[in-house]
Image: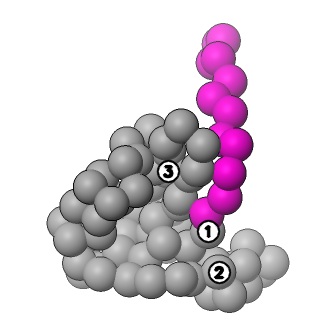
Amino acid sequence: MIAASLILIAATWCAPHDRLVSILQEQFHLSLSARGLASSGHVVEVWTGRIEWKMVAVAPSGQACVIVEGEYWILKSHHP
């Protein structure tokens, strides 16, 4: 329940997914780094740049919202 509250509180702005992708790429110079399917049916995306990162929730309708953002994203190697 805490995670759901965080998502609702942290929502900063929303737009149709294709429009939000353009903004993330062109204005913030971010690239899609990861994507996963949440149990709610939303797709959660992680967009990263040299310093900053943003997480985006995409509803089945195509509406996308930045739900949390920050700095200093570190990608760890995945070893099975």
Question: Does residue 76 belong to the magenta stretch?
Answer: yes
Determine which quarter of the picture holds residue 72. top right
Span colored in magenta: 69-80
Q: Measured from the top left, where is residue 35 in percent x and y?
A: 43, 47
State which quadrant residue 62 falls in: bottom left
Would you name the residue on which mark 2 appears? 10
Q: Which residue carries the number 3 mark?
A: 46
Q: Distance between the residues labelled 3 and 1?
A: 10 Å
Residue 4 vs 51, above or below: the answer is below
The x and y percentages for residue 5 are 72, 85
| Mark 3–mark 1 CB contact (< 8 Å) | no
Q: Which amino acid type is marked by label 2?
A: Ala
48 in the magenta segment: no
Q: Residue at x 29, y 65 (%)?
A: 23
* Location of residue 69 with respect to 53 vertically, above or below: below
Give the mark, 2 or 3, whose residue is nearer the N terminus. Answer: 2
Q: What element carries label 3?
A: strand
Type of amino acid under label 3: Val
Seen in the picture, residue 68 relative to 21 is either above or below; the reply is below
Query: Which of the image's four quarters has the C terminus?
Result: top right
Label 1 element class? strand
First in sequence: mark 3 or mark 1? 3
Mark 1 / mark 2, whichever is N-terminal: 2
Name which residue lies at 38% across and 83% down.
14
- Residue sitting at the far front: 27
Instruction: Give me the residue at 40% from left, 47% from top.
Output: 30
